[in-house]
Image (tube, rainbow, N blue to C red):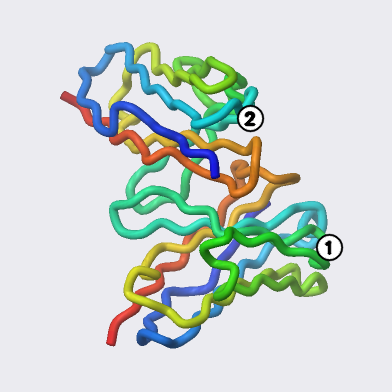
């Protein structure tokens, strides 16, 4: 199974800050990586697909980059509504796997 | 692709639970239906999927002996049955639709399963 290691697992930042989350795959997954946002009590929401493509309707302050084994997710200017948990997800190989999640809080 | 799941369940250890996930008739047969669960305060765990036609399933090894996914195409509904429930099966179970072997942006609202004696 491909292991996805996210860091940090929790993060506290101020409104307007640039926030970066990383996801490391245990083997090469090319660009077969999605990023999701999940708010409490809600289903996850797709933000980034194929590592760097912004899903339709998602604000442009969200971005993703990387390929192979190292991936980065960035919020360019943190907004109060971005408080959530963020997950990476690889789909290069079955079983599909997710990172542990990064809980983002406002400082 | 709106997906509507059945309601919360409370089961005893050793019992089985069957959750339904209903989609729209016009698009349902185009999508793979995956099941993902999330234990309290935990991350996301993929359980498997059923093909658009319902003629094949793929399960995560962890669940292979205990999960059955079926599809009622005329009713635009898929079902996930998990047997021999244990306390660590307590979770929110989500169905999610995509056009392939990946998780996309079409999710049900989730079904809470509680396992308690």
Snapshot quadrant of residue B34: bottom right
**SS at badge 1:** loop
How packed is label 1: few (under 14 Cα within 10 Å), some, or many (20 or more)?
A: some
**SS at badge 2:** loop
Query: Residue sitting at 32 percent across and 22 percent down?
Result: A79
Q: Is residue B104 above or below residue B114?
A: above
Side of A104 relative to B86 (left or right): left
**Residue A89: x, y in percent?**
52, 37
Query: Residue sitting at 52 percent across and 56 percent down?
Result: B36
Query: Does the rendering let one see residue B31?
Result: yes
Query: Residue sitting at 29 percent across and 35 percent down?
Result: A103
Cα–Cα gap, marks 2 and 1: 25 Å
Q: Are marks 2 and 1 in contact (CB under 8 Å)?
A: no
Q: Is residue B117 above or below residue B3?
A: below
How packed is label 2: few (under 14 Cα within 10 Å), some, or many (20 or more)?
A: some
Snapshot quadrant of residue B5: bottom right
Q: Please give the residue where the numbered disc 1 appears in the rendered image.
A: B53
Side of A105 relative to B73 (left or right): left
Which one is in front, B31 or B69?
A: B69
Q: Residue furthest left?
A: A107
Which one is in front, B21 or B51?
A: B51
Q: Quadrant of the C terminus of chain B?
A: bottom left
Q: Please give the residue where the numbered disc 2 appears in the rendered image.
A: A32
């Amino acid at each position: 199974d491909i292991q996805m290691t996210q860091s940090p697992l929790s993060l506290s930042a101020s409104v307007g800050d640039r926030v970066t989350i990383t996801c490391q795959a245990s083997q090469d997954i090319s660009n077969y990586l999605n990023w999701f946002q999940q708010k409490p009590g809600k289903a996850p929401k797709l933000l980034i697909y194929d590592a760097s493509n912004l899903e339709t309707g998602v604000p442009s302050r969200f971005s993703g980059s990387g390929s192979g084994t190292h991936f980065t997710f960035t919020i360019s200017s943190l907004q109060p509504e971005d408080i959530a948990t963020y997950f990476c997800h690889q789909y290069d190989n079955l079983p599909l796997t997710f990172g542990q999640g990064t809980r983002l809080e406002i400082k | 692709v709106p997906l509507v799941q059945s309601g919360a369940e409370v089961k005893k250890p050793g019992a089985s639970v069957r959750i339904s996930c209903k989609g729209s008739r016009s698009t349902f047969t185009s999508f793979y239906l995956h099941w993902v669960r999330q234990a309290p305060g935990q991350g996301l765990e993929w359980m498997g999927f059923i093909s658009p036609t319902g003629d094949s399933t793929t399960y995560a090894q962890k669940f292979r002996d205990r999960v059955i996914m079926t599809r009622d195409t005329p009713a635009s509904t898929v079902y996930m049955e998990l047997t021999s429930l244990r306390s660590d099966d307590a979770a929110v179970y989500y169905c999610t639709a995509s056009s392939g072997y990946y998780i996309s942006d079409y999710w049900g609202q989730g079904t809470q399963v509680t396992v308690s004696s």
